[in-house]
Image (spheres, helix red, strand yellow):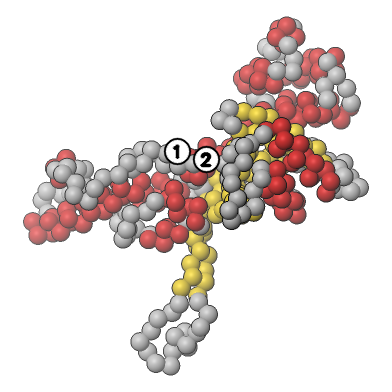
Amino acid sequence: MDETVAEFIKRTILKIPMNELTTILKAWDFLSENQLQTVNFRQRKESVVQHLIRLCEEKRASLNDAALLDIIYTQFHQHQKVWDVFQMSKGPGEDVDLFDMKQFKNSFKKILQRALKNVTVSFRETEENAVWIRIAWGTQYTKPNQYKPTYVVYYSQTPYAFKSSSTLRRNTPLLGQALTIASKHHQIVKMDLRSRYLDSLKAIVFKQYNQTFETHNSTTPLQERSLGLDINMDSRIIHENIVEKERVQRITQETFGDYSQPQLEFAQYKLETKFKSDLNGSILAEREEPLRCLIKFSSPHLLEALKSLAPAGECRIQKPLCYSASYSQGTQDLSSC
């Protein structure tokens, strides 16, 4: 086994918490059950690592074997990455092709290797028709850096791919080209979605969350609704507050449902509008070019934060939002807040 591979495996194992080590090694499925039984996992971690490295040397672990271990570790700790969403589309009149995973892998790898002399690509298929891709980038003169890879999760027969954020932004266009061609799509765009929680991003783009809707003619008695009103208030004020709070509660429930929201941390809204004024001679009124701005939202749990604004009186919802659709279009309906 090459020294660089041994060092790569060593660093990966050192990152794994001891209470997860056995589980991850079994998922790796490189060392046999009999080999793992020879390891005393109760001793100091340094001794455990040395024993595991000796077993890997006996089996002559390759760079791809080490990369697979790193993929599995990242799957267990995917929240340590920030994930971006990319959406692909077919050309006009193009039909949906049957997906061949082997063909996809070969095509993806060839595109990157033709463009870059030094790049290593590893794959790991998972359930739900997903493939995890690990790319270690090099240059024409330097070997791939195995410690700063890019991860991509692609779901076959869907137009969506999830990519870990990376400082190597210059390689993003090449990565997008490889994804588009290998999956037989026409073009690819980056969506305005970003989060550490990959499952939440999946729930949004694949519309897998539980969102319930009520009609505006709800028959639920007001007494059964938790509106938080003070019974000692003036009757006229109580009536006004009940009507407004009932409306806010109804629309909030129609918008977000009764269940917990997918955990999203970042979103942005692009606004483009023309200035209107009744005043003659206004500088802005004569402006032909529309006003443009970009509003960015960030929160440890953005959707739950937005959901709580309306009942708190901080957000006035004029119409039902549907984030399953609005996010794929650039989070446009967030403008109601």
Comes first in the chain, label 1 or label 2: 2
Vertically, is 47 above or below 249? Answer: above
**Secondary structure type for disc 1:** loop
The residue that mark 1 highlights is 208
How far is the residue under mark 1 from the one under mark 2? 8 Å
The residue that mark 2 highlights is 202
Residue at the spot x=62%, y=28% of the render?
Answer: 126
Vertically, is 41 above or below 64? Answer: above
Determine whether, in the image, residue 316 is placed left or right of residue 191: left
Name, please, the residue furthest toward the left.
Answer: 235
Residue at the spot x=15%, y=49% of the render?
Answer: 230
Q: Amino acid at mark 1?
A: Gln
x and y percentages locating residue 337 in the rendered image? 38, 60
Q: Amino acid at mark 2?
A: Lys
- Quadrant of the image for the N terminus? top right
Q: How many numbered marks appear?
A: 2
Task: Report crowding for label 2: few under 14, some 14 to 19, many 20 or more residues within 10 A (C-alpha).
Answer: some
Q: Are marks 1 and 2 in contact (CB under 8 Å)?
A: yes
**Secondary structure type for disc 2:** helix
Find residue 77 and report its image quarter. Answer: top right
Determine whether, in the image, residue 324 is placed left or right of residue 132: left
x and y percentages locating residue 53 in the rendered image? 81, 19
Question: Is 260 in front, or is 299?
Answer: 260
